[in-house]
Image (cartoon, grey):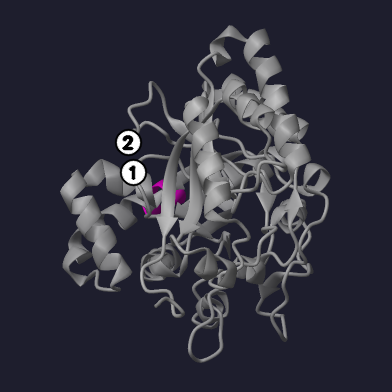
């Protein structure tokens, strides 16, 4: 029997959260009525390695030196490929998390192409758009080597659903007939045009909770881009404009995941969660309502990256609302103890603003993690 789609994530990155990439691919399949299965390279490695081996492999991968793990990788990759072969899909959708995972992706593609599968191999993700010294993206290089059939550059929400509905001549979907690379334009209306992820068929059992939570932590994406233009950051290269979902739309997704898989704890994977104060306020208000209506959401919590603002922008009522909405911890880009340096970084807040932020967080029991720079170029 031939099935529709096999979704794959090349995602060796951490051992505590199910892959958001697989949830995205699964959501696209469900939106188009396709039957599908999912597999995560990360899960397969977690099932095969102990913690020390896993961490060592990740360290070696970042150094692009995985030869000493060749035997283990061969075993894991062959097992993944066999599961896909047994399913007999018409299409294989693969997400490559970053350029760091490129060697793993190459090994996987090579083994996949050695089978008798007639499925189209379609890849996407940040690792695909990485540009090599010869000027070619990873996607173009893998296509040139005959390892894949299509690769997507840019936001894949619309492209992926259109592909699954049979379209092939799409902006951003590059294949052998393409004379030049094209990119998907950034989406403006995320409420209407973005794919709603699904964790219903995503493997979660292998993920070891690193925050002593009672259950698995899931990922939420509420915006793309950033309202800041910090001097050292490349987010604007991928998303030149800051675009965000309404708080009501995000809260509805939380309820969906809760009903689907019992999700209670979430990490928001945006560049920042308070880029739109209106949307963020609405999200917290919606979650307060949902927690009151659903007793099983009483322990709901979220964390995410946050920008520090002054007291006028973030009055005390704002922190109180966050606490009631379920905010547990924030990651903030403090970067330095120097107001001058922070101004040169375009961070746009002072130590006085930071003091106020920390006082409010202490009052409302919200933990903070600092991001810090050592040796910024203009530091004295």
Say which of 202 and 215 sits in front.
Answer: 215
Whole-angstrom CA distance, mark 2 to mark 1, is: 8 Å
Residue 36: which quarter of the image?
top right
Tell me where the magenta segment starts and ends, as one range.
81-85
Q: Secondary structure at mark 1?
A: loop
Q: Position of residue 188 (x, y in %)?
A: 82, 55
Say which of 189 and 328 sits in front.
Answer: 328
Circle 2 crowding by C-alpha within 10 Å: few under 14, some 14–19, many from 20? few
Q: Position of residue 268 (x, y in %)?
A: 56, 41
Residue on which disc 1 sits: 15
Could you tell which of marks 2 and 1 lies nearer the N-terminus?
1
Residue 120: which quarter of the image?
bottom right
- Which quarter shows the N terminus? top right
Residue on which disc 2 sits: 210
Q: In the figure, is residue 57 to the left or right of 81?
A: left
Q: Is residue 298 visible?
A: yes
> Disc 2, disc 1: CB below 8 Å?
yes
User: Which residue corresponds to the image point at 70% horizontal and 58% vertical from the top-left?
Assistant: 227
Residue 65: which quarter of the image?
bottom left
Q: Position of residue 61 (x, y in %)?
A: 30, 66
């Amino acid at each position: 029997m031939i099935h529709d789609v096999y979704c794959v994530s090349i995602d060796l990155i951490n051992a505590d959260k199910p892959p958001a990439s697989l949830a995205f691919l699964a959501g696209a399949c469900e939106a188009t009525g396709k039957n599908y299965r999912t597999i995560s390279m990360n899960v397969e490695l977690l099932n095969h390695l102990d913690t020390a081996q896993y961490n060592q492999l990740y360290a070696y991968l970042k150094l692009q030196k995985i030869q000493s793990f060749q035997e283990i990788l061969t075993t894991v990759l062959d097992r993944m490929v066999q599961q896909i072969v047994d399913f007999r899909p018409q299409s294989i959708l693969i997400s490559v998390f970053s350029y760091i995972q490129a060697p793993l992706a190459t090994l996987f593609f090579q083994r996949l192409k050695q089978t008798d599968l007639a499925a189209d191999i379609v890849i996407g993700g940040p690792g695909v758009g990485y540009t090599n010294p010869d000027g070619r993206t990873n996607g173009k290089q893998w296509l040139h080597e005959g390892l894949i059939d299509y690769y997507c550059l840019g936001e894949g929400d619309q492209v992926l659903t259109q592909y699954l509905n049979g379209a092939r001549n799409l902006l951003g979907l590059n294949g052998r007939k393409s004379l030049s690379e094209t990119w998907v334009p950034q989406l403006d209306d995320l409420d209407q045009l973005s794919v709603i992820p699904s964790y219903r068929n995503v493997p979660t059992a292998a993920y070891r909770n690193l925050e002593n939570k009672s259950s698995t932590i899931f990922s939420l994406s509420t915006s793309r881009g950033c309202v800041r233009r910090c001097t050292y950051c490349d987010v604007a290269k991928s998303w030149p404009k800051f675009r965000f979902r309404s708080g009501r739309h995000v809260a509805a997704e939380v309820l969906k995941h809760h009903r689907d898989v019992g999700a209670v704890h979430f990490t928001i994977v945006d560049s920042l969660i308070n880029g739109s104060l209106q949307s963020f306020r609405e999200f917290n208000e919606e979650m307060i309502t949902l927690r009151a209506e659903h007793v099983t959401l009483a322990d709901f919590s979220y964390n995410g990256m946050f920008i520090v603002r002054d007291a006028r922008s973030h009055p005390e009522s704002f922190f109180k609302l966050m606490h009631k909405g379920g905010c547990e911890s924030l990651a903030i880009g403090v970067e330095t103890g120097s107001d001058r340096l922070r101004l040169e970084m375009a961070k746009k807040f002072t130590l006085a603003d930071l003091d106020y932020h920390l006082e409010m967080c202490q009052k409302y029991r919200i933990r903070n993690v600092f991001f810090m720079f050592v040796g910024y170029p203009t530091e004295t």
